[in-house]
Image: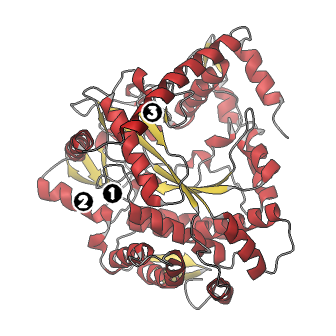
Amino acid sequence: MASGTDPQFERRLAALVNAREPGVLQGGLKGVEKESLRVMPDGRIAHTPHPHALGSALSNEHITTDFSESLLELVTPAFARSAELMRYLTDLHRFVFRHMGDELLWATSMPCELAGDADIPTAQYGSSNSGLMKTVYREGLRNRYGAAMQAISGVHFNYSFPAHFWEVYADVCASRENRQDFQSRGYFDLLRNYRRHGWIVLYLFGVSPAVSRSFLEGADVGLDALDAHTLYGAHSTSLRMSDVGYRNRSQSAIQVSVNSLADYIRDLRHAIGTPHPPYAEMGVRQGDRWLQLNTNLLQIENEYYSYIRPKRVVRAGETPSAALQRGGVEYVEMRALDVSAFDPVGVNDNKLRFLEAFAAYCLLRSSPPIEPSEQQALDDNHLQAARRGREPGLMLSSEGRPVMLSVWAAKMLDEMTGICELLDQGDATRPYTAALQAQREKVLDTAATPSARLLHELRANGESFQQLGLRVSSLHKDYFLALQTPDEGRLSRFADEARESLQAQQGLEAAQRDEPFAQYLARYFAALPR
């Protein structure tokens, strides 16, 4: 609802306020996964192996790789306070930079200049069958979608509501469901409303309005030329989340419902069990070279890209959907944040606080099922916000009616006021209210958005996208190496974890040495739930 009120939202919020449960929304667990390309001092992608001192990308829980051997991924544990999360993420960066030699971490979501797909090395995870499976899966991504798209970086925010909240919320909703079913249903209410309203995250935090011309390899995608090496969208917020980036047509045949946990699992399993003719034509192997894990719509469940996912920590040998079926939804993973060139760790407290409040907003609102016709309009809203979000007078679609983005955004932020007040209870500094106010300023003035700021920097400095990325990446490295009073105990633990992860990889390789990979893979897929 972009116009009028949502009576259910107002009743639920009032009931939480009147429940007189101190800190009813406080203490939710927060974690971050942050990706960055390793690049050389001249700004070209690094072709060096994953640094040995960072441990095993297969077995290290906190320092790993994503698609490429050069695409570093830093993973924090879950914290109740965002300030603690940010300190941990800062310490991870300190540790990484101590062991990267003269290499840098690329400071933006859209990659550095690339010399085609062959310039992007696939991640390697050793000789164990589980490691080979991760590498072959990535070869499948390369062959299905191209490597350049997989070299884009992002920040994922993992969030779970505090355990005590669900008890109060069940009373508010007069629910008689068991705790697991009620919690899962609540998270799916959130998922549906994130699909309806999550375009605002792209407007507020998108910081990828420009891209190196080399990324597109000559394709005409309707962008303007800033200079000989840089293309941009005049009003774009997040090319990463547009049809230039992740929103390609390759997964258009895959429709995964978030109307219920059962529907979600059904659709995911259908996609990983349904052959796709173009992938069948490609084949699985060429001689001894593996091209992909299988010829289905999805090789594995993680291949499905969405703005937000329901999650549960998986047990050994368990798929994500099997974990959800076993224990219900434990947390959500919000995947739409660009890496910010203006924050050394790629994200900041205000973003995390806003997303925490936004999760509650999406949960408390009425959330009817999403029909296929509505889903198309929701997808288009996200695309318009990514491609044209700062365009004056831009109209989106809400319940079949046109509504101005700025009007809808301002209304949403006003409705979040009470949620931020609940999150601020007992804190005189009112950090959540301050985070909300910072977003209001971006709606009032598009020049305050990070996407506008990045374009301003490019123009003001006369820089290409590549030059800006290299300059900021160098500044970030200097920042981390110059930080005073590091937590040496934590850095020492990171070193211990790195050594232990290398030993764990060696153990896996020894244990799995005798089983042929083809046999391992056949056994893996035969054991999947149907």
Residue 291 visible here: no
Residue placed under numbered mark 2 in the picture: 455
Residue placed under numbered mark 3 in the picture: 494
| Rendering coords of residue 361 (x, y %) | 58, 75
Query: In the structure shown, which secondary structural element does the residue marked by tag 3 occupy?
Result: helix
Q: Earlier in the sequence, mark 3 or mark 2?
A: 2
| Rendering coords of residue 503 (x, y %) | 56, 18
Q: What is the three-letter code of the residue carrying label 2? A: Leu
Q: Residues within 10 Å of mark 2 (few under 14, many from 20)?
A: many
Q: What is the three-letter code of the residue carrying label 1? A: Pro
Mark 3 or 1: in front is 3
Q: Earlier in the sequence, mark 3 or mark 1?
A: 1
Which quarter shows the C terminus? top right
Of the numbered discs in the image, which one, if any, rests on residue 209? 1
Cα distance between the residues tagged 3 and 1: 35 Å
Please name the residue shown 27% across and 25% down the image. Answer: 101
Vertical side of 145 occupied by 127: above or below: above
Cα distance between the residues tagged 2 and 1: 7 Å
| Rendering coords of residue 35 (x, y %) | 44, 42
Query: In the structure shown, which secondary structural element does the residue marked by tag 1 occupy?
Result: loop
